[in-house]
Image (tube, rainbow, N blue to C red):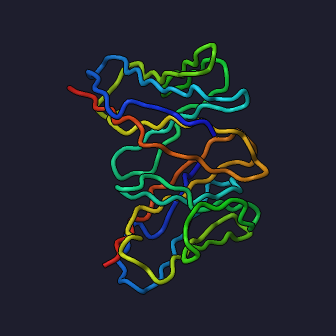
Amino acid sequence: DAKTTQPPSMDCAEGRAANLPCNHSTISGNEYVYWYRQIHSQGPQYIIHGLKNNETNEMASLIITEDRKSSTLILPHATLRDTAVYYCIVRVPRDNYGQNFVFGPGTRLSVLP
Amino acid sequence: KAGVTQTPRYLIKTRGQQVTLSCSPISGHRSVSWYQQTPGQGLQFLFEYFSETQRNKGNFPGRFSGRQFSNSRSEMNVSTLELGDSALYLCASSLVGAAYEQYFGPGTRLTVT
């Protein structure tokens, strides 16, 4: 699976959009981009994933560049409850070998009042 | 639909003892994965089970083992506990299929004294 690079920390003002970048320059054509977040001492929470097209759900939007070498997770209106560590993971679908995700150190997002 | 449940939530054991942790996946999810999270190593994959068979294994010693039952519930066991086994142990379940996301439980906090 391709490696990802994320900034170690970011701040965002409450009510503003939080834009979390992820670099995955070695991504291959069949690798998906997943985003998870982990609020202190809780299990990671799935946010969104995508392959090529931009994706949106009730939690966030995922913007993937045309060359797929980077992506941005957008939380449109950040709240204090969005303070968490955000993980960007690139993964090859390989159901016959089983499911596992490789988590890096992620980005610690602090939403400030 | 109920989420992934893990029991117990907290556990204190002594060096040399063994421990068994339990995980009930989301209804309909047949793949169950286990992860260990420590401050120093982050989130690390332990193993994954599907249809009562271990399909994938991380780089952990043989003291760490697991199993899955016919109802997809899973247990993991750690024998001869060491101080370094103190960690948050997380279980995740997913549907069978290459690109499906994993959903995590709240974790079991194990402290070895």
On screen, residue B57 versus residue A9, left or right, reads: right
- Residue at image point 71% right, 65% down: B54
The residue most toward the top is A66
> x%, y% of residue B36?
48, 60
Identify which residue, A113 or A99, lies in the foreground.
A99
The residue most toward the right is A96
Q: Is residue B100 above or below residue A26?
A: below
Q: Give the quarter of the figure containing the C terminus of chain B.
A: bottom left
- Residue at image point 54% right, 22% down: A70
- Residue at image point 50% right, 45% down: A103
> x%, y% of residue B61?
55, 72
Q: Is residue B5 above or below residue A60?
A: below
Q: Is residue A70 above or below residue B37?
A: above
On screen, residue B105 versus residue B27, left or right, reads: left
The residue most toward the left is A113
On screen, residue A98 versus residue B88, left or right, reads: right
> x%, y% of residue A21?
45, 23
Q: Quadrant of residue A54?
A: top right
Q: Quadrant of residue A11?
A: top left
Q: Is residue A29 above or below residue B35?
A: above
Number of labelled discs?
0
On screen, residue B25 versus residue A84, left or right, reads: right
- Residue at image point 71% right, 56% down: B30
Identify which residue, A107 or A60, lies in the foreground.
A107
> x%, y% of residue A100?
62, 50
Q: Quadrant of residue A1?
A: top right
The residue most toward the front is A26
